[in-house]
Amino acid sequence: MLAAGLGVGAGLAHGGSGDSAGQTRDSYEESAKRLPVRKFDVIVAGAGTGGVVAAIAAARQGARTALVEVKGYPGGTVTEGGTALHSFYNLWRAIPGVEKRQVVKGIPQEIIDRLIKVGGCSGHAEMTQGYNYDSVCTAIDTELYKLTAFEMLAEAGVFVYVNTLLTGAIMDGQCIRGVIVESRSGREAFLAQSFVDCTAYGDLSAHAGARYTEPNDYAVCNSVGIGNVDIDKYHAFLEANQVSGQLAKGLRSGQPDRIVRAGAEWINVPGMAEAARTIGMGMITTTVHDNYLMFIKCNLKLPVSPTNRDEVAKAELEIRRRMAKAVEIFRKYVPGCEKAFMARTSPSLCIRRGRLIECDYDITLADVLEARHFDDEVMVYGFHDSAPRYQVKNGSTYGIPYRALCVKGIENLYACGMMITSNHDAHMSTRNTVCCMGQGQGAGTAAALCAERKLGSRDLKYTQLRGALTKAGVYFDT
């Protein structure tokens, strides 16, 4: 069974250790070996936006839970790719008469509460400009988010395996029995009852033989944090050029009612506009510190899917050149940024979609815009990243059905986050950070319940899942 997870075809023409009889001109056959085994109830692949919440949820449900992450910390896109967390609330401010509701609670809100206590979050700051896009801005300190998430995982009893690469799946028919992981400690097999894929790229699902496509329908990006700046002067600069598009005030450096989000979709300042367009630079940013812009994004459209290692290697270099130019643009054009410097970058480029994993249900654009609900939903959500062009009807919510997380053809695997939803415009809602977090709580809870009862994902009674989610603070419209 363990041999099923061992990779073949390392792509080596010559060289390497092992029996030369296993070599050809364009392949190398790796020798089988006996791997040490660790056993769990639930394995979550990827400690990103959804994976952190999924692992905490599973562990709190009583499951012996392992979390496997290739980087040295948890957080994912929340800490690396966005400008704020979108969105814990419905879009009430855009539509007169609509009731303000916080529609995502549970573990995601616990993370925010913890961050506020350590000065790492703006709180749910209400938008005063640009609220047709989102009614709130929830800005975070990236480094404190990593620490807080790590601490919450430890407190929940999750076995956290960072600096560990998932390299294969051990299959028994349509059921996953384990995963192959590799680290500086060597190659191991982790066995479990239930599995959650939160890798963003769909790595576990692909290893398990799930059906998928690679739409390549987004640009990739990296986000640079810029230090020694003044966000108040930046906002004044935008207003002076009559292009200020978004504004929110909240907690900044421990003080309330300070600007925490500012920017516009486009700044038509001669010279600056052309320079920003050339490097795909966004002009909307957030911060929780007086002298820091947390995220300035530089985008790049790849000719192929971001699963292509060689093209991504070229893109990593190009985007880092673009981020350096972004800092130069701020120094040259924006008052208060004359001595700006690059303070933070993500360790690798960020994606909005890699592999699209085929699940039992595919959320449609009509489901999102018509505010449809389902008899098996694990959460509700009300944000769309293409607002105001697309908005959830009447400032309401739609449901994420449980079956939209169940990977088709696999008995015990869930997919969360940007890996679900084939329609690009619907995906512009379901891929957003807070939606991914909520999906993680639903999948992690379900995985733990299935492991406890030794059930496949489709054998779990929804009433049991709904009861567990409600008890854990998840909000439902009905």
Image (cartoon, helix red, strand yellow):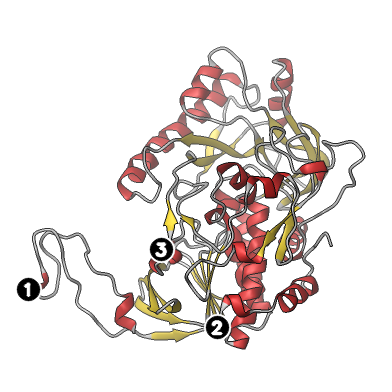
Q: Residue at x 62, y 87 (%)?
A: 453
Looking at the image, the residue that sits furthest to the right is: 97
Q: Secondary structure at mark 1?
A: helix
Q: Residue at x 43, y 61 (%)?
A: 211
Horizontal and vertical percent position of residue 60: 68, 78
Q: Which mark is residue 41?
A: 2
Q: Is residue 250 visible?
A: no
Estimate the spatial distance between the alpha carbons at disc 1 and disc 2, rounded to whole Å: 40 Å
Do labels 1 and 3 touch, CB within 8 Å? no
What residue is pinned by disc 1?
A: 21
Estimate the spatial distance between the alpha carbons at disc 2 and disc 3, rounded to whole Å: 21 Å
Task: Identify the amino acid type marked 2.
Answer: Asp
The disc, 2 or 3, on the residue closer to the chain's N-terminal end is 2
- Classify 222 as above or below 243: below
Closer mark to the observer between disc 2 and disc 3: 3
The disc, 1 or 3, on the residue closer to the chain's N-terminal end is 1
Q: Which mark is residue 206?
A: 3
Estimate the spatial distance between the alpha carbons at disc 1 and disc 3, rounded to whole Å: 30 Å
Horizontal and vertical percent position of residue 284: 64, 33
Which of the two residues, 23 or 229, is positioned nearer the viewer here? 23
- Classify 217 as above or below 40: above
